Amino acid sequence: MAEQQLSRLDDAALIRESQRGNRAAFEELVRHYDQAVLRLAMHITGSDTEAQDVYQDAFLKAYRNIGSFRFECSFYTWIYRIVTNLCLDSLRKKQVRKEDSATQVDSQGETYDVLDQVADGRPGADPERDLMRRELGATIARALDRLTPRERMVFELKHYQGLKLRTIGEMLNTTEETAKNTLFRATQKLRGSLATMR
Amino acid sequence: MNCEYVKENAVLLVYGDLADDARFEMERHVERCAACAAEVGAVRHLQDTMNTALLPEPTPNLLASSRMRLQEALEHVEHRKGWQRFFTFDVANWLYQARMAPAMVAALLIVGFLGGALTTWRIKPGADGNGGIFKSNPPQPAAEATIAGIRSINPDPADQNKVQINYDTVTRQQAQGSLSDPQIQKLLLFAAHSNVNPGVRNDVADLLTSQVADQQARDALIYGLRYDNNTGVRLKAIEALKPYVKQDVHVRDAVVEAVLNDASPGVRTEAILALDPVKADNSVRRVLMDLAERDHNDYIRRKAQDMLNQTPTIE
């Protein structure tokens, strides 16, 4: 708790410095959050390149608009609001293009399966279990793809990022109740899609 | 509490987003109702299933390259802003205002004159017979105080020959105390971030080394490693941070960044050596492999390869 408060104090000082045009302070602020931002963007876009684009656009937008930050919410909520909007745009574009979500393009321009990126850290993991894990991962990825961009985002923020519904509502500029309903729909759809696995 | 409510809120129960009283009531209901227990069980099963699909995590390489890209882009944003400011400066309007405000023009001339005079002459407070131009907080003598900036200039509406100027001064002070004194620590942290005197920053790095167990001292050293333009300071920062590379992920990230991006091969070499306790980590191994294959510096490539050779092979 004390550490969190200290971090907020640090953030406030860094934000004020950034508002005065101190770029080093802004870069330090970026480092407090950029790993979480990149992680969220990778989960949502499933691609290194797109995640980097979201990361870049989000922090540039934050830098340009830091002057209008009025400390009405935490910087964390503010930057996540920017990132979730960019991710939602990315998801919407992807749905229009109807891309195969499991196959992505990396920063070198080569295609890869998203699930291949998940390292199996267990020494001596057996190939059969590995194959099963991959199949399960592919089924889950397809189930996630069937969600609307908003449902996907709310599920990501709740399940993988562990945020409270109130915070999710703030980030998505909606109410806690709407976020709850969206999460309910998302879990119902996922349960339907994954029912055969039980 | 009814079954419909449980069905709608089971997901909140599983994800811990229910208020305590609602959770308590729901748990009691679920204990008695088999259908609701099955509903909650189904959501828990979904949660477990989703946890089995580990999503890709950003590697230190990806994070470092994202940071570099952002830094470059931020520089362009600043440049553009500077030029925009230049082009949007309305010279005609400024001249019009200057022409229409002789008092302000006079005030600016007076400020220029005073600014020069105050920085070169020793001023005696109250030397002005009729109360002087400094109505409040008479300044320190110029030898002991330096003018840091002018806050505001207010021409006297009743008399065009008078003007009120509010300004800040900087005076030299001295602090003495133990390293555990919060005031001393605050000054040390300020000095670590100050970019004026590399000698001072070097001394601070030495002192912070003894305080590295403290998170703030560690953060200041991480800051030094990332941003200080003095190689000696960065080397000292690595030396001090080395014992924490395994237990503090921020330290590890900063050291990995130094390995990848630092301008000095000496700092990069020390950073590679500092990664020794975490050389078996997947992400660190990947960075070392990249360096061993692609780095433009022969010595760095060899050092990275040496480190990899000492790493136990993982199937």
Image (cartoon, rainbow, N blue to C red):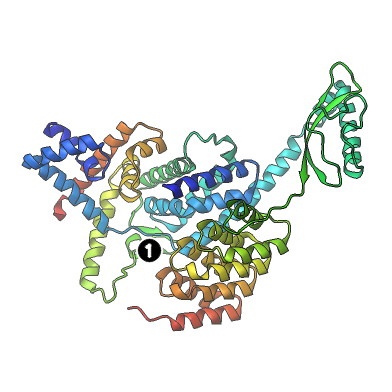
- Side (left or right) of B237 relative to A187: right
Q: Residue at x 64, y 58 (%)?
A: B192
Furthest-top residue in this view: B158
Location of mark 1 (residue): A112
> A73 or B139, which lies in front?
B139
Chain name for mark 1: A
> B48 or B195, which lies in front?
B195
Q: Residue at x 42, y 45 (%)?
A: A87
Name the image quarter holding the C terminus of chain B: bottom left
Local crowd at mark 1 within 10 Å, few (<14), some, or many (≥20)? Answer: some
- Side (left or right) of B144 relative to B271: right
- Side (left or right) of A67 relative to B110: left
Question: Can residue A121 be spotted in the picture?
Answer: yes
Element type where label 1 sits in the image: strand
Q: Position of residue B251 (x, y in %)?
A: 50, 63
Q: Position of residue B25 (x, y in %)?
A: 16, 36
Q: Is residue B278 above or below residue B248?
A: below
- Side (left or right) of A184 relative to B131: left
Total tally of numbered discs in the picture: 1
Q: Kindly indicate the quadrant of the structure image that contains residue B246.
A: bottom left
Q: Position of residue B189 (x, y in %)?
A: 61, 55
> B42 or B274, which lies in front?
B274
Q: Amino acid at mark 1?
A: Tyr
Q: Position of residue A25 (x, y in %)?
A: 60, 49
Q: Residue at x 71, y 43 (%)?
A: B82
Q: Kindly indicate the quadrant of the structure image that contains residue A155.
A: top left
Q: Is residue B64 above or below residue A57?
A: below
Q: Is residue B252 above or below residue A22?
A: below
Name the image quarter holding the N terminus of chain B: top left
Question: Can residue B33 be spotted in the picture?
Answer: no
